Every structure is written in C-alpha cells, then in structure tokens.
Image: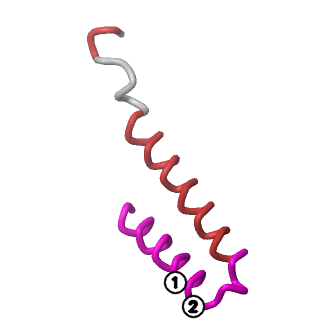
Amino acid sequence: MEFLNLVIIFIAACLVLRKPHKERLAFGLLVVSVLLMVFLFSIATRTGLLPGVNY
C-alpha cells in the first residue's frame, strides 16, 4: 500500500510538470494519497496506542 502512495504522488508530480492545466486533478490525487496515508497509519496504530500492561 505504501508503494501505491508513492505511485500516486509520482503521477501527480508528472501531471504538474507535463500538463500544468491538470493541476486540479494532481491536487485531488495528493488529497487521496494523504487520506490513504492517514488510514494506513490509523490501522497500524489502533492496537499500538497503549502497551499491553495498561489494559
């Protein structure tokens, strides 16, 4: 999934560099990438917020 984030960011960068008029699409791709990162972070840390001895 992290590789998917990198690919989305790379596509957004290529869009901005090669086709500046598609900046809105590139921004949308970056927003999707950030939301995916937040989702993956929340999944990874859901059980890791408190150590096992504090339950």
Q: How many marks?
A: 2
Circle 2 sits in a helix, a strand or a loop, which is it? helix
Kindly identify which residue carries mark 1: 14
Q: Is residue 6 left or right of residue 38?
A: left
Residue 19 in picture, x, y percent from top left: 63, 90
For the magenta stretch, what is the residue range? 1-24
Circle 1 sits in a helix, a strand or a loop, which is it? helix
Q: Residue at x 55, y 76 (%)?
A: 12
Spatial CA span between label 1 and label 2: 6 Å
Residue 42 in picture, x, y percent from top left: 47, 40
Name which quarter of the figure residue 41 lies in: top left
Count neighbours of disc 2 (C-alpha within 10 A) and say few if under 14, some if 14 to 19, many if 20 or more: few
Mark 1 belongs to which amino acid? Cys
Q: Are marks 1 and 2 in contact (CB under 8 Å)?
A: yes
> Does the magenta portion include 10?
yes
Q: Residue at x 62, y 60 (%)?
A: 31
Mark 2 belongs to which amino acid? Arg
> Does the magenta portion include 34?
no
The answer to whether residue 49 is above or below residue 32 is above
The answer to whether residue 27 is above or below residue 50 is below
Kindly identify which residue carries mark 2: 18
Viewport quadrant of the C terminus = top left
Q: 48 or 13, which lies in front?
A: 13
The answer to whether residue 43 is above or below residue 8 is above
Q: Residue at x 33, y 8 (%)?
A: 54
Q: 47 or 24, which lies in front?
A: 24
Residue 3 in picture, x, y percent from top left: 36, 67
Farthest residue, direction top: 54
Residue 21 in picture, x, y percent from top left: 72, 86
Q: Main secondary structure of the magenta part?
A: helix
Farthest residue, direction bottom: 18
Q: Residue at x 39, y 62 (%)?
A: 1
